[in-house]
Image (cartoon, coloured by chain):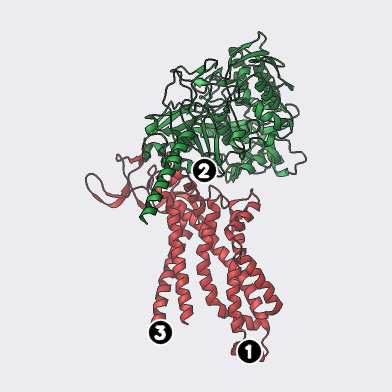
Chain colours: A green, B red
Amino acid sequence: MNVIARLSLLVCLLAGVCVAGASSAENPAPENPGKNEELQRVADTSGRYGGHLTVGQRAEPKTLNPVIATDAVSREVIGRLNADLIEINRATQQTEPALAKSWKTSADGRIFTLQLRRGIRFSDGHAFDADDVIFSFAVYMDENIDSPQRDLLIIDGKPMTVAKIGPYTVRFTLPRPYAAAERIFDGLAMLPRHLLEKPYREGKFAQAWSLNAQPSEIAGLGPFRLKQYVPGQRIVAERNPYYWKVDRDNHRLPYLDEMVFLFVGTENAQVLRFEAGETDIISRLSSENFNLLAHEGTRVSSQLADLGPSLEYNFVVFNQNDLTGKKLDAIARKQVWFRDLKFRQAVNAAIDRDGIVRLVYGTRGTPLWGNVGPGNKLWINQAISHPQRSLETARQLLKSAGFSWKTNGELVDGSGETVDFTIVTSSSNAQRMKMATLLQDDLSHLGMQVHVVPLEFRALIDRVFQSFDYDAAIMGLGGGDADPNPEMNVWMSSGTSHLWNLGEKQPATDWEREIDQLMQRQMVELDYNQRKRTYDRVQQIISENLPFIFLATPNTLAGADGRLGNFHPAVLDPNTLWNADELYIRGGLENAGTR
Amino acid sequence: MQVRVRCKMSGKITWLIILLVGLHLLLLLAGFVAPYDPAAQNRELPYAPPTRLHLWDSSRFHLRPFVYPWSPVDDGYREDRSQAYPVHAFVRGDSYRFLGLFESNLHLFGVENPGKCLLLGADAFGRDEFSRVLYGGQISVAAGIVATAVTLFVGSVIGVVAGYYGGWIDETLMGTTELFLSLPWLYFLLGVRAFLPLHVSAVRTFFLLTCVIGLIGWARPARLVRGVVLSSRTRNYVSAARGFGGADFYLLRRHIAPETFGVLLTQAAMLVPRYIAAEVALSFFGLGVNEPTASWGNMLSALQQYSVLISYGWLLAPAAALFVTSVIYYLLADALHSRLESR
């Protein structure tokens, strides 16, 4: 018996040694920078190696394929596994070299010549060069793959062309000058031709790099590489030992051994897990959860950041879509009101924006009167007026538009029909639900009968984008980039997010025509000041004609474990993980990975 | 001994019925008892905690309770002791329809403006939680009672027909009850509600909701009624009445149906709280009565947010009201059941 006990102890000890050996071998040590590698030095960064960072995600990613991913959760993971030619520094909101160490723009702003870094390698050790860039753009621009990034590369219906000038030089030619064209490159991950050319040629690209793919089948140029995917639970990414950035002491980044993406489900679960210390970093916090984390103090240590107004804008949109052939007669009748500028102006005047900010965001939000909020300092038109709430003005506007009031206070239009409509919003977004209830109360003071209908998010999107079976909706947009170009699809009459009137063959109104012209113009103007003037005019037209009635913007709120170093959350997405390569655990290895 | 037990039961039942009547009267007279309009927002007072009633100020004791207004500070609210508002009985305030019959603005109690007497605190929009619990109770409890009535009507008709006629009618109807009993009713309700139109008023939503809740619950009472009918239709007095030429309807009305009353009463006491909970569940998931109309379910839905749940305990008031109501109903059902057994 004694012998058996000793033997089992020995076996246990040996197994322990093996496991320990295996785990120390699991985390690849960063390679010392080689002489032939043109690495990027992040001058003001220093940190310590080791540890892992756990991130709670509200859903499970759908794919790891950067070309076809559309959802934010997938892109959050993909962004850490891949890199772009030029990237937007989220802290400065300016572009800076990434895989391209430098670039030149021709005098007419149409030709971009990029010099790639020499000697750098994908996370599987394979060298990166111009052929990978040519291959990547061929995939992004392939009509059959229908990448969401493709729209950015098609200007005036013509694709940009890419040519290999040398093994480390590529030239992009745009069909016409394009303002801030270098910003396009951010978000276009460079793909390994040696791994993906085969599935691409075989027409199986869309199936490549699914979640079930083996880690050995996936390689990128990002700070991390895929280590393990456990369905329904987590994705583990480990350090890319060949990453192309070094810190000021010439230590290869990233500092962290691993990043773990934990699928927790909901915002509540995200907060609970963070509070319990099971995750280390949290972004897109609501003001209530932010205050909770700030006051509770149940977490051992945390650093919370309120970055001020975000780029997101929340608004009410009235359905002005063409409903011909849709069998939506009741809505079509109400569209007479919705298309009346005075009606929209009256609604705009009746909204208690300060109340919305106070009740929805606490003090961590800002009222909005336009699509560009104070968070976007480069592009906001400061001249746009901020009229205070005035029910009297609203009543005057309604009266002058032919509306009147019954003895019981109900508002009726010229034909005697009661002004009665529904506002739909996403049931999963507590903030917008609150806005809807406040709006309902505000408009009841004008005698409008407003019903709030919470809808499941996909049902809401279907109604707003497809069936047009809604009266009004509260939605939110923005947050991607501070530049006006990503807003093209909202404000151009042909845009895919031109929500109030989708699928216009030609501008329905003169002011929409003017916006079309101005947005086209700002896209090709290369001088910032001139572009700013053009976009100022766009904002002014929008605030005068109110296709959207803007409500408020939340502050960007984020938090992290107190021991996380180089935590510099930013207003632009991804707020907290944009500098994942620089994040490190203070105190180094002895504390790292204890959770 | 037998007599004593029955007397004790009767006493318990009486007390429970008095409690229930009191509770329902409170809800019925919500407009009068509640100091404020349930939809009236106070945007300066989101999540204000329950107002404290005071009898002492810094100098002396007051016979009439008074309140201090809440004043917002960085981390919540504190009492502004610079001014006190005495609580008065029978005050004029927001107007409401008394029992749905006539306009009134008389309230049981209240304080002078701008003071606020928020007995159970305020919700996210600064609405008085106490007033909303009362008005919300009207919707939730009425939904429970109406749905129960629908269920018992349908259930007893089907039960009586199946039990009395027997044969293939019985087999078909009882087969259907088995199908209905096996339904996961909450998911079924969620599914059915999703098919109902979105653009409906609170009143129509209420009726649709109660009908749907009521119509799918008939299976169990139908079975119980059938059992009672089955046993009573062969009793001697029924056979005798039939022998004297009593028609089916006469026999059912005069001799058989009265036998089912006890079962139906017990079932009613059990079904009401269950259906109140069904309404609460649907409204909790946003499928019931919509804002700004209060119902216990849509009031509780605010607690789906973790931060609200742990920060503002007074918003659990509708859950407490639901608990108390359910317990009284279940105690009554239990007492009625015991009484039925002892007969």
Side of B217 where A9 appears, left or right: left
Picture layout, residue B336 above or below residue A29: below
Q: Position of residue B339 (x, y in %)?
A: 46, 78
What is the CA distance from the residue labelled 3 to the residue labelled 1?
31 Å
Quarter holding the N terminus of chain A is bottom left
What is the CA distance from the residue labelled 1 to the residue labelled 2?
65 Å
Q: Position of residue A429 (x, y in %)?
A: 54, 41
Mark 2 residue type? Thr
Helix, strand or loop status at disc 3: helix
Side of A514 where A409 appears, left or right: left
Q: Which mark is residue B239?
A: 1
Res A146 → quadrant: top right
What is the CA distance from the residue labelled 2 to the residue labelled 3?
59 Å
Please state the chain letter of the residue tagged with numbered disc 3 in the rendered image: B
Instruction: Please tell me if label 1 and label 2 are on a single chain.
Output: no
Mark 1 vs mark 2: in front: 2
